[in-house]
């Protein structure tokens, strides 16, 4: 797969005529760009804009390019951008395996084997039929990461994905996430207010 | 398609009401060519005003609207103020939905069997301490003051207002407010009344208005419990409308407009009362009084609602007892013999109406649920989700859209259904099941919307976002994520819709032209002179049908999600 880069060109977002944030950045394949900001600085708005969820109340200008292709006008589901939230958000009505299968593109051959292999990959072999609510916080986070990767995104946005994990897990999870994202050659954009996140990400850092 | 649904809903609700009101207004001024009324005149009004007892009918309708609402609201607010999370409080909260699901007619019959001279209460008091050897010669049910009518309405409106208040309380953070006031030395009940109630009332104002409108214009309950000579205004209108002499229709139309006026007058008076209470209340809230009355308020808060809930439940038990009673001489508390004879005799004639009732209710509810889901989903997708309640449903202010939803609940049924029949007759439409379903939809739709919108809007938008970023289409996200996760509230809303449809009397009667019979029309028809045993059977059947819906609404999600801990307790 060709590794695209994610570009945010002259992004300017305002609410009720008041400028919220301005950004111009390019994230190379396999790079994690960290955007730091305190709460209320518009970090989440930036992600909503890049992912295609910006509420109509905001006025945004600028472009989002993925692999040189403009995707600013595309709806969220066709942008090819994956998202990792603060919570794992595993669908509570589906089993662990169904959660992973949800992310697989429709035409994937031999889905069951793929899902089983993915579970084994994160040390959860045999967990497929489990109720996600019975998994520990760390296990849920790993399933969420794997679900994201299985959906074969071309870029990834991370919305403080570690802030709700307890201290002991946090470092371990960061290592795993960044390692996997780099391994897949994905351009990733991390927003956080935690300096430790930025340090573990090891990439460039922009303050809002 | 999705984009049009909000407008479709508005058109569905507002169109028929306006058309109906217009077609009630024209004959009221003598114009209805089909019946030979070619010129405008005031003759219908003259005929109306010449009716004996009209003033009394109007007075009872008006008083019933205000008194029912005042008492129900007081009971609900006192209960909420006194509620402390005890076993009794939790039991009452759990009883809200079942009590709400009892159709008005069944509850009214239950109350009648309870308080009638030969009813359960009189039996319990006889022969000692009352000394009655025979049923006392008292006019309790159908009393000329409409007191039993109001009592019947009150036991049904309390669960409605309680449910609406509980939903609104979510937004208020009541516990923290009360805790704050208590730390300043206020007793808990007083604290609630002073710091929560003033913010709660504006949120339940529309439901309160709906209660006023309903209580001032109700037909079925008034036929069962209301005064007879003269009956309430709405019942009189129905009699005139159904009179064999078609020329009475002109007078009936004038009556329909008068009913609209009476209801509006009741609403206006309530508004005046609101202003008065607000003015008096302001001094009380700020007066610094922290303790006085706590004990009494707390006692009243628990006792009154308990009395209302028990009355409704014992009434239903009374229905069951009557439907099974063989010989049952007066002072005996229980029948001497028990028999299935009444059930056996009624069974052959039950099937048709039960099937018709369920069919109409199911179709109306499914239509309503489809429209409501489409409108709410559209609201979510267009990003007009009212995060803090400023925007919603249509582009306009949320309150404006909500008022439109409440329109069928605030305009008296008899005022516009009536004109709607005239419209249908003018169009040459024959009474069909579809027409009745359409009539029910007018009332089912608002209730389904009100029950579902809260859960739908509170649903975490990130669930759909996750689905979309994983490549699901918006439709896929709806069917595979949002709908299954919201199944429980959806089923509850549909159970409410079913209950509303099952209880409808006037739309079935008028739009079905008496040819479509449901358990409700049959049960109410028995009110005048039917045998008690038979009424017991029919009213009990009527009361149990809505329960089916609630049993499914509670049971199905549990069955489906036995193995999904995250789905227990609605999201």
Image (spheres, coloured by chain):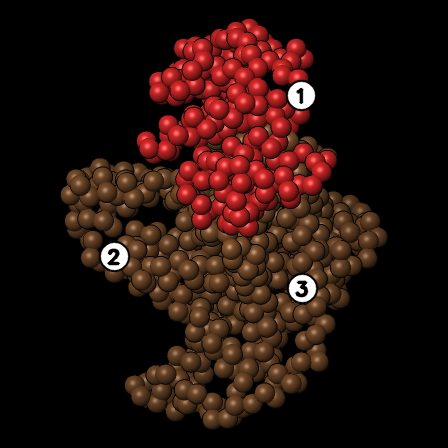
Chain colours: A red, B brown
For label 3, the residue is B358
Q: Residue at x 15, y 43 (%)?
A: B185
| Side (left or right) of B286 relative to A73 | left
Q: Residue at x 65, y 53 (%)?
A: B365
Q: Is residue A49 above or below residue B454?
A: above
For label 2, the residue is B298
> In terms of image quadrants, where is residue A139?
top left
Q: Which mark is residue A1?
A: 1
Q: What SS does tag 2 mark?
A: helix
> In terms of image quadrants, where is residue A110?
top right
Q: Is residue B84 above or below residue B342?
A: above
| N-term-proximal mark, 3 vs 2 | 2
The answer to whether the residue labelled 2 contacts the one labelled 1, judged by CB atoms less than 8 Å apart, is: no
Q: What SS does tag 1 mark?
A: loop
The mark closer to the camera, 3 or 2, is: 3
Q: Position of residue A82 (x, y in %)?
A: 57, 26
Q: Nearer the viewer, residue B32 or A62?
A: A62
> How many other residues sit within 10 Å of disc 3, few (<14), some (14-19) or many (≥20)?
some
The answer to whether the residue labelled 3 contacts the one labelled 2, judged by CB atoms less than 8 Å apart, is: no
Q: What SS does tag 3 mark?
A: helix
Q: CA distance from mark 3 to mark 2?
A: 42 Å
Residue A132 visible here: yes
Q: Residue at x 67, y 58 (%)?
A: B362
| Side (left or right) of B292 relative to B464 | left
């Amino acid at each position: 797969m060709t590794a695209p880069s994610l570009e945010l060109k002259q992004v300017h977002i305002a609410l009720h005529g008041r400028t919220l944030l301005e950004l111009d950045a390019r994230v190379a394949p396999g790079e994690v760009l960290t955007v730091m900001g305190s709460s209320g600085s518009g970090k989440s708005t930036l992600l909503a804009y890049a992912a295609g969820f910006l509420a109509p109340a905001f006025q945004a200008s600028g472009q989002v390019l993925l692999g040189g292709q403009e995707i600013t006008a595309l709806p969220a589901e066709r942008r090819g951008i994956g998202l990792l939230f603060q919570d794992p958000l595993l669908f509570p009505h589906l089993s662990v395996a169904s959660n992973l299968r949800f992310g697989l593109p429709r035409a994937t051959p031999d889905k069951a084997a793929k899902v089983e292999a993915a579970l084994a990959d994160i040390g959860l072999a045999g967990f497929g039929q489990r109720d996600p609510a019975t998994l520990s916080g760390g296990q849920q986070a790993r399933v969420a990461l794997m679900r994201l990767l299985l959906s074969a995104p071309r870029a990834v946005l991370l919305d403080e994905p570690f802030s709700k994990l307890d201290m002991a897990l946090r470092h371990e999870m960061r290592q795993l996430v960044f390692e996997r994202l780099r391994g897949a050659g994905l351009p990733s954009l991390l927003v956080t207010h935690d300096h430790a996140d930025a340090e573990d990400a090891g990439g460039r850092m922009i303050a809002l | 398609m999705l984009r049009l649904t909000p407008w479709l809903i508005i058109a569905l609700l507002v169109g028929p009401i306006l058309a109906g009101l217009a077609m009630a207004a024209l004959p009221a001024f003598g114009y209805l060519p089909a019946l030979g009324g070619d010129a405008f005149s005031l003759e219908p009004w003259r005929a109306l005003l010449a009716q004996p007892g009209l003033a009394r009918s109007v007075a009872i309708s008006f008083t019933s609207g205000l008194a029912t609402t005042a008492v129900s609201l007081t009971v609900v607010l006192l209960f909420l103020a006194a509620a402390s999370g005890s076993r009794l409080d939790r039991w009452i909260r759990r009883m809200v939905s079942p009590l709400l699901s009892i159709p008005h007619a069944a509850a009214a019959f239950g109350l009648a069997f309870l308080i009638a001279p030969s009813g359960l209460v009189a039996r319990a008091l006889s022969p000692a301490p009352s000394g009655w050897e025979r049923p006392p010669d008292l006019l309790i049910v159908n009393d000329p003051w409409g007191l039993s009518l109001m009592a019947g309405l009150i036991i049904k409106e309390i669960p409605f207002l309680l449910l609406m208040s509980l939903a609104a309380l979510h937004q208020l953070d009541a516990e923290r407010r009360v805790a704050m006031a208590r730390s300043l030395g206020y007793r808990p009940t007083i604290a609630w009344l002073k710091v929560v109630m003033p913010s709660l009332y504006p949120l339940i104002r529309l439901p309160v208005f709906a209660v006023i409108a309903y209580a001032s214009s109700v037909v079925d309950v008034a036929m069962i419990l209301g005064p007879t000579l003269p009956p309430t205004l709405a019942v009189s209108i129905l009699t005139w409308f159904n009179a064999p002499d078609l020329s009475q229709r002109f007078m009936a139309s004038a009556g329909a407009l008068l009913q609209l006026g009476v209801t509006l007058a009741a609403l206006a008076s309530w508004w005046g009362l609101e202003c008065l209470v607000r003015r008096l209340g302001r001094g009380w809230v700020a007066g610094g009084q922290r303790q006085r009355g706590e004990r009494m308020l707390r006692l009243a808060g628990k006792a009154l609602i308990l009395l209302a809930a028990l009355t409704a439940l014992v009434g239903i038990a009374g229905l069951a007892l009557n439907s099974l009673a063989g010989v049952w001489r007066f002072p005996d508390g229980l029948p001497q013999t028990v028999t299935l004879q009444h059930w056996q005799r009624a069974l052959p004639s039950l099937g048709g109406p039960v099937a018709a009732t369920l069919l109409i209710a199911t179709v109306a509810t499914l239509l309503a649920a489809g429209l409501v889901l489409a409108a709410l989903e559209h609201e979510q997708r267009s990003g007009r989700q009212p995060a803090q309640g400023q925007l919603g449903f249509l582009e306009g202010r949320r309150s404006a859209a909500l008022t439109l939803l409440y329109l069928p609940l605030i305009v008296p049924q008899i005022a516009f259904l009536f004109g709607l029949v005239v419209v249908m007759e003018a169009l040459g439409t024959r009474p069909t099941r579809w027409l009745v379903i359409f009539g029910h939809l007018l009332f089912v739709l608002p209730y389904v919307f009100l029950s579902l919108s809260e859960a739908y809007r509170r649903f975490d938008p990130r669930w759909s976002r996750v689905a979309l970023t994983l490549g699901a289409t918006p439709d896929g996200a709806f069917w595979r994520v949002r709908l299954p996760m919201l199944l429980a509230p959806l089923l509850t809303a549909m159970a409410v819709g079913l209950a509303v449809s099952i209880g409808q009397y006037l739309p079935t009667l008028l739009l079905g032209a008496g040819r479509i019979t449901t358990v409700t029309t049959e049960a109410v028809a028995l009110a005048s002179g039917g045998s008690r045993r038979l009424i017991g059977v029919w009213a009990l059947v009527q009361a149990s049908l809505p329960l089916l819906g609630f049993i499914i609404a509670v049971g199905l999600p549990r069955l489906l999600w036995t193995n999904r801990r995250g789905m227990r307790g609605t999201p």
